[in-house]
């Protein structure tokens, strides 16, 4: 006998709004004329995200609980992560929509399906084809990201993982310039992403074998009572972790990050770096804090090693890079390590510091990549470090903004980066992992070298290089200014948001 | 008037000044005047604040202000000063306007370069006041790290040919030390009473930590301070930085910023970790004596003027550390007085050397000089006075403090005092040899005529020489402010002077 599960739709109103917006966007692609699509898609996407955010704050907050036959959960951490994904996606979409005076979003190709350098491509360019499918793709991906940390069931989590990943694979291949690099990045991301999904699925199956259910609360109960197929638990957790660690770009599952970050259209890189990380860490929090917390002795040392490796490898590799997007990619690996150091501390400070760091990191990453899109040479982005030489003389505002973000990446006080680092390291020391904090600060010192080298190049370098800075429209300007304001705000007066993160660190199970 | 928030005001005036100067319009002709006005206002306000300071109870923190800042981390925005902090703040705010005048013609008013230099100097002043006034360990750390940014730009943007490397070296050393301290700061909080004001110095003083934990915490703090101070063998960044920076920047760096290291040893290492401090004393004393001799010997062999001054500073910092860790009232009072004296002496040496360098076509190479007392008798003469102050000639400022350090150290560690005192001979060597090579001999053949000291330069030098004489003949007011604070520190450490106490200044004690 099948009884339909009761679903609290209001709890998932934001998610529904986002998916609906994405589907409407698909219809627009099919039915609206070529010339009108951009004018429809951008407001539609922004509107959807804003509406979802409003729904989250006003409606969902009062409908927390486990619903849909235990498959979905709306609790404070899920809402915070979802809200963060929405806010970050909003700024990310602004940067994606940037046209820089052209007729089409500037970073994206007119014809994604065409072979780079082919006649089709030339024709599409000539006809002025617009790329607007990025907007519904982004919305669908955002939907997956919101579902990811709200899943109370490994199967739903897997679906969310795929929903968030597939549009990203496509988005990565749509760069307007350096098409081959972009398509290669897309393929790489797709291949490795599929592998990692398979690992995740495998882990989920093992945990099902262990607990007899995919539901996180059942797994937690089984761990607590200890009556399960003990031999399956640890491998299950570890395989599951592989899938999640891949998404956040932690060592040793980081190899895709630099190539994909470099190849993808820069606005997509920013969006991906910020939002995917938030969503994946959200899911990780749920797995480790809810489902397998009782088996912490099995996974904590492994994750601690992963955190330490991520910090060290990310830091050491970043200092050898000469491409700004790759520098930011390796730095994102190091940052994943910092976040992990907070996450594995467990306790409440672990969850709250992780969420705070995600907030801080997201809002410095998107503007950083947005600024990268503005520095051009001969029409394409100038991402080699030498091409930024002396930028401060030509464009003091851009250099100043980027330098400030770099200070935040380096974790200098009075920026959000410092507050975030302080939060995660405090959690780590508090949780008994003081050696991880020591590794973290040493890695920070190493990464500081490359950040300050970039500042040095911009401020102290000579200016005889052929790059120029294009003037952004209000879209990018908004994203950058908002990011800077939040980065400064979280550094100077982090109290309200820390309170939010601390108050929202209790999981429903 | 005592309820007026003096400390915050002293912090805000230069900070606002920095902002104003940075935002002045591009072609504005009076950037320097505006900056100087702000620094003079700060000086005047400091004088008023100091008049509200009760010297009679200089051992206690006064003019205290405490506001809750980030209660989640236990952080308060807490400022206040005892005699030592007051003296250091007074030293800083006196030196800043002098340095601004000294740097008057150093930076051309093209683009925003001049805006930048003067704005960074004012921001640095704000942070310096903050770092000496902070009575919250976290707040101290914030200023300690934030200070790096203005100094980094002052060296890296406005220095000599190797400035970028010097700035990076300075930054990485300082950041590494600071980050290690960060872990100690976190761990200290977790050792303390915790809560929303758990970082307040008064709540962390007198903790019974003990054992390995205390030693590790002590080392975390001490490493950062030893790098900043700079002590052998962690000094290597200083000669580079001091020689590449503008003379005025070097003054800020060596005369004030490095004092944060020795100040921190007294305020944090001794007060917070008395047992560990005693444990570390033998090693620290040995390192201090090595610093004294090493700095002096290298100064003798130097051919670069700025480096020479930097090495003399390493030697003098050795004396300061020696006096601090000898832990007698006399030696510590001598050390704190030494911090002031060294500030003025080094400032004079750097600035006067800078005047010569400008006149000699930018050459810092000592052998390229010779006979300059015939060309510029006034400059050569004042340099000699500053040099004599540096070698601690009786009647000039440094004599009193050096004597007190040696006498105080002798009370407890005669051997160290004897070895340290031998550096007095070396000091005579490096100063007099330098002066001989530079100023005596036949008049040099100059391609262009050179003028002696200008009015502006006299404005720079006169207050410094006046300070030499006042502090040399009548140091009592300063000692009165310092001694109670030192006594308080030693009480906290729990050490009493060895009997019989040397009777230094007659029977009035």
Image: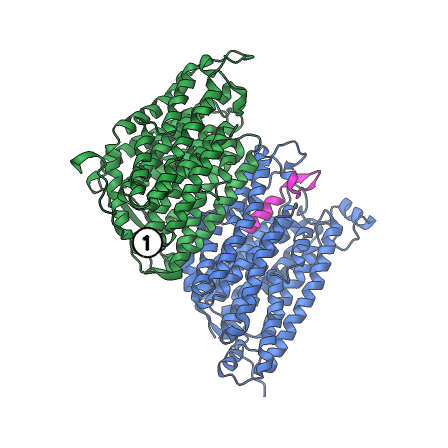
Chain colours: A blue, B green
Quarter assignment of residue A469? top right
Q: Position of residue A279 (x, y in %)?
A: 56, 62
Quarter assignment of residue A301? bottom right
A355 horizontally vs B337: left or right: right
Residue shown at 35% from the left, 52% from the top = B277
Task: Read off the magenta span.
Answer: A365-386
Indicate whether residue A369 is drawn in magenta. Answer: yes
At mark 1, the secondary structure is helix
Q: From this viewpoint, which residue is outermost toward the left?
A: B508
Q: Is residue B478 above or below residue A90?
A: above
Q: Which of these two is toward me, B491 or B161? A: B491
Q: Residue A54, can we see it?
A: no
Q: Position of residue A442 (x, y in %)?
A: 52, 53
Q: Is residue A371 above or below residue A147?
A: above
Q: Position of residue A108 (x, y in %)?
A: 69, 49
Which of the image's four quarters has the C terminus of chain B?
top left
Residue shown at 53% from the left, 77% from the top = A70
Q: From this viewpoint, which residue is outermost toward the right?
A: A119
Q: Position of residue B106 (x, y in %)?
A: 49, 24
Quarter assignment of residue A203? bottom right
Residue designated by label 1: B274
Q: Which of these two is toward me, A162 or B493? A: B493
């Amino acid at each position: 006998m099948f009884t339909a599960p009761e679903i609290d739709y209001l709890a998932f109103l934001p998610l529904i709004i986002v998916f609906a917006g994405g589907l409407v966007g698909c219809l627009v692609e099919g039915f609206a004329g070529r010339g009108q699509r951009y004018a429809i898609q951008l407001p539609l996407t922004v509107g959807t995200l804003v509406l979802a955010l409003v729904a989250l704050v006003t409606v969902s907050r009062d409908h927390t609980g486990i619903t849909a036959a235990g498959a979905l959960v709306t609790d404070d951490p899920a809402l915070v992560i979802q809200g963060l994904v929405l806010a970050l996606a909003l700024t990310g979409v602004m940067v994606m929509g940037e046209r820089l005076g052209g007729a089409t979003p500037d970073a994206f190709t007119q014809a994604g399906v065409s072979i780079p350098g082919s006649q089709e491509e030339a024709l599409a360019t000539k006809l002025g084809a617009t790329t607007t499918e990025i907007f519904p793709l982004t919305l669908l991906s955002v939907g997956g990201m919101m579902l990811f940390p709200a899943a109370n069931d490994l199967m739903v989590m897997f679906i969310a993982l795929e929903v968030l990943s597939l549009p990203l694979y496509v988005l990565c291949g749509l760069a307007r310039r350096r098409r081959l690099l972009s398509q290669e990045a897309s393929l790489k991301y797709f291949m490795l992403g599929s592998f990692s999904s398979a690992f995740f699925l495998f882990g989920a199956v093992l945990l099902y074998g262990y607990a007899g259910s995919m539901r996180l609360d059942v797994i937690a109960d089984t761990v607590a009572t200890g009556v399960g197929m003990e031999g399956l638990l640890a491998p299950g957790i570890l395989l599951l972790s592989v899938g999640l660690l891949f998404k956040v770009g932690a060592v040793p599952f980081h190899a895709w990050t630099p190539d994909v970050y470099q190849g993808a259209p820069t606005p997509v890189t920013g969006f991906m770096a910020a939002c995917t990380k938030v969503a994946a860490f959200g899911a990780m929090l749920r797995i480790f804090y809810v489902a397998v917390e009782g088996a912490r002795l099995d996974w904590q040392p492994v994750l601690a090693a992963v955190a330490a490796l991520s910090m060290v490898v990310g830091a050491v590799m970043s200092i050898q890079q000469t491409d700004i997007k790759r520098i930011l990619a390796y730095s994102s690996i190091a940052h994943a390590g910092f976040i992990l150091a907070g996450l594995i501390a467990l306790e409440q400070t672990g969850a709250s510091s992780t969420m705070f760091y995600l907030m801080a990191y997201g809002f410095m990453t998107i503007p950083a990549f947005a600024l990268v899109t503005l520095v051009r040479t001969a029409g394409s982005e100038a991402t080699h470090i030498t091409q930024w030489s002396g930028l401060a003389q030509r464009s003091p505002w851009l250099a100043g903004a980027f330098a400030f973000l770099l200070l935040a990446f380096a974790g200098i006080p009075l920026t959000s980066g410092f507050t975030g680092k302080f939060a995660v390291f405090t959690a780590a020391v508090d949780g008994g992992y003081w050696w991880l904090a020591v590794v973290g600060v040493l890695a920070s010192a190493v990464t500081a070298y490359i950040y300050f080298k970039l500042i040095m190049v911009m401020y102290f370098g000579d200016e005889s290089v052929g790059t120029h800075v294009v003037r952004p429209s209000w879209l990018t300007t908004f994203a950058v200014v908002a990011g800077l304001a939040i980065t400064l705000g979280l550094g100077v007066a982090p109290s309200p948001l820390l309170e939010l993160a601390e108050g929202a660190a209790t999981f429903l199970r | 008037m005592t309820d007026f928030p003096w400390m915050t005001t002293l912090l805000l005036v230069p900070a606002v000044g920095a902002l104003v100067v940075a935002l002045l319009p591009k072609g504005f002709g009076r950037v320097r005047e505006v900056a100087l006005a702000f620094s003079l206002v700060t000086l005047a306000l400091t004088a008023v604040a100091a008049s509200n300071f009760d010297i009679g109870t200089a051992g206690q923190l006064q003019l205290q202000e405490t506001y809750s800042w980030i209660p989640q981390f236990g952080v308060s925005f807490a400022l206040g000063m005892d005699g030592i902090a007051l003296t250091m703040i007074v030293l800083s705010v006196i030196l800043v306007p002098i340095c601004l005048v000294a740097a008057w013609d150093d930076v051309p008013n093209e683009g925003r370069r001049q805006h930048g230099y003067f704005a960074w100097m004012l921001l640095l002043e704000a942070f310096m006041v903050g770092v000496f006034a902070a009575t919250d360990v976290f707040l101290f750390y914030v200023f300690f790290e934030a200070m790096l940014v203005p100094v980094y730009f002052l060296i890296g943007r406005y220095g000599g040919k190797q400035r970028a490397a010097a700035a990076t070296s300075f930054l990485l050393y300082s950041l590494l030390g600071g980050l290690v301290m960060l872990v100690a700061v976190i761990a200290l909080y977790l050792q303390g009473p915790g809560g929303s004001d758990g970082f307040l110095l008064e709540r962390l003083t007198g903790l019974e930590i003990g054992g390995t934990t205390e030693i590790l915490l002590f080392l975390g703090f001490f490493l950062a301070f030893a790098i900043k101070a700079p002590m052998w063998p962690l000094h290597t960044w200083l000669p580079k930085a001091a020689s590449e920076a503008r003379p005025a920047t070097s003054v800020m760096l060596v005369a004030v910023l490095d004092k944060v290291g020795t100040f921190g040893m007294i305020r944090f290492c001794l007060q917070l970790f008395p047992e560990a401090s005693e444990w570390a004393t033998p090693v620290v004393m040995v390192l201090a004596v090595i610093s004294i001799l090493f700095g002096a010997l290298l100064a003798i062999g130097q051919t670069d003027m700025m480096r020479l001054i930097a090495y003399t500073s390493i030697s003098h910092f050795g004396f300061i550390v020696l006096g601090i860790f000898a832990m007698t009232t006399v030696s510590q009072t001598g050390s704190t007085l030494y911090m002031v004296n060294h500030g003025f002496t080094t400032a004079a040496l750097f600035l006067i050397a800078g005047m010569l360098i400008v006149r000699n076509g930018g050459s810092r190479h000592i052998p390229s000089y010779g006979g300059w007392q015939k060309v510029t008798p006034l400059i050569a003469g004042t340099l000699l006075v500053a040099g004599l102050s540096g070698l601690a000639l009786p009647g000039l400022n440094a004599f009193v403090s050096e004597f007190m350090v040696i006498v105080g150290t002798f009370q407890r560690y005669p051997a160290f005092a004897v070895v340290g005192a031998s550096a007095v001979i070396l000091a005579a060597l490096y100063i007099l040899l330098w002066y001989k090579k530079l100023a005596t001999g036949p008049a040099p053949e100059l391609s262009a005529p050179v003028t002696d000291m200008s009015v502006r330069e006299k404005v720079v030098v006169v207050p410094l020489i006046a300070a030499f004489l006042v502090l040399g003949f009548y140091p009592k007011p300063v000692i009165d402010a310092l001694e109670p604070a030192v006594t308080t520190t030693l009480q906290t450490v729990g050490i009493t002077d060895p009997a019989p106490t040397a009777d230094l200044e007659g029977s009035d004690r």
